[in-house]
Image (cartoon, rainbow, N blue to C red):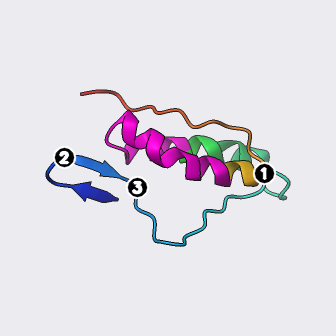
Amino acid sequence: MTFNLVSDQYMPFMKPNNILHYLNTNSNHHPVILKNIPKGVNKILSEISSDEEIFKKVAPQYQKALDESGHSYKPQCQHTPT
């Protein structure tokens, strides 16, 4: 995570040139595992994004990785305002 102590914001951190990969939907894993991958990505992204604006900023790179793996899921921010 990246923390901004001045603005009290936090967001996911990714090393430069990092490429996200998720299990492909055509893999031989149990369907329950494959079904929960997008939900897990969504949950983690929501938890490590301080607000919806940050979530929307970082979500496209995760969306791309999910799409490339065959998952038809659109991450939605589950952040609850304080």
Circles 2, 1 touching at the beta carbon (< 8 Å): no
Q: Which residue is mark 3?
A: 12
Q: Is residue 48 magenta?
A: yes
Look at the numbered discs 3 and 1 and tell me whether their residues touch, using CB distance below 8 Å.
no
- Splitting the image into 4 quarters, where does residue 20 fall? bottom right
What secondary structure prevails in the magenta region? Answer: helix
Cα–Cα span, label 3 and label 1: 28 Å
Judged from the image, the secondary structure of the residue bearing numbered disc 2 is loop
x%, y% of residue 82?
Answer: 24, 28
Q: What's the residue type where badge 1 is placed? A: His
Assess disc 3: are there few (<14), some (14-19) or many (≥20) residues with their C-alpha within 10 Å of its C-alpha. Answer: some
Residue 60 seen anywhere in this rendered image of the structure: yes
Q: Name the kind of residue labelled 3 in the image.
A: Pro
Verify whether residue 13 appears in magenta: no
Which quadrant, please, contains the N terminus?
bottom left
Q: Residue furthest top?
A: 81
- Above or below, 2 against 62 in this view is below
Q: Which residue is mark 2?
A: 8
Residue at the image point whose x is 48% and y is 72% from the top: 16
The residue singled out by tag 1 in the image is 30
